[in-house]
Amino acid sequence: MPKLKTKSSVKRRFRTTAKGKVIMNPSGKRHGMRKRSQKMKRQARRTTYLSSSDAAIVRPFMPYGR
């Protein structure tokens, strides 16, 4: 069986945990921070888990990511 290719964009944006959940960094933190609420800026500091339906879309793009 040939090797499967990983999507390069997914490689940079997502990681998987040991249990197989998909971790992502929140979006919207590059510029324009003045218009964001303080709550959004605070919550966007940490990583979050993708929902199971979104993780099912992303997971095939990284076949070797556990």
Image (cartoon, grey):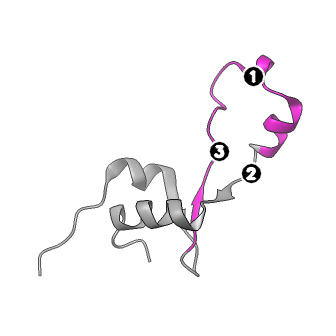
The CA span between labels 3 and 1 is 14 Å
The three-letter amino acid code for the residue at tag 3 is: Pro
Q: Earlier in the sequence, mark 2 or mark 3?
A: 3
- Which of labels 2 and 3 is toward the front? 3
Residue 27 on the magenta span? yes
- Give above or below for 24 relative to 19: above
Q: Between disc 2 and disc 1, whose residue precedes?
A: 1
As drawn, 27 above or below 55: above
Q: Is 12 colored magenta in this rendering?
A: no
Q: Residue at x 80, y 37 (%)?
A: 40
Query: What residue is at 31 percent from the left and 54 percent from the top?
Result: 7
* 61 in relation to 64, above or below: above
Q: CA distance from mark 2 to mark 1?
A: 16 Å
The span picked out in magenta is 21-43
Residue 46 is marked as 2
Task: Determine whether the residue tagged by mark 2 lies in a helix, strand or loop.
Answer: loop
Which residue matches tag 3? 26
At which x and y percent is residue 64? 35, 73
Give the secondary structure at mark 1: helix
Can you give x and y, in whole percent of width and height, for residue 20 in the image?
Answer: 54, 77
Residue 26: x percent and y percent? 65, 44
- Please give the label number shown on residue 15: none
- Image quadrant where one finds the N terminus: bottom left
Query: What amino acid is at disc 1?
Result: Met
**What residue did someone put label 1 on?**
33
Q: Quadrant of residue 39?
A: top right
- Pointer 3 or 1: first along the chain: 3
| Horizontal side of residue 34 vs 30, given as left or right | right
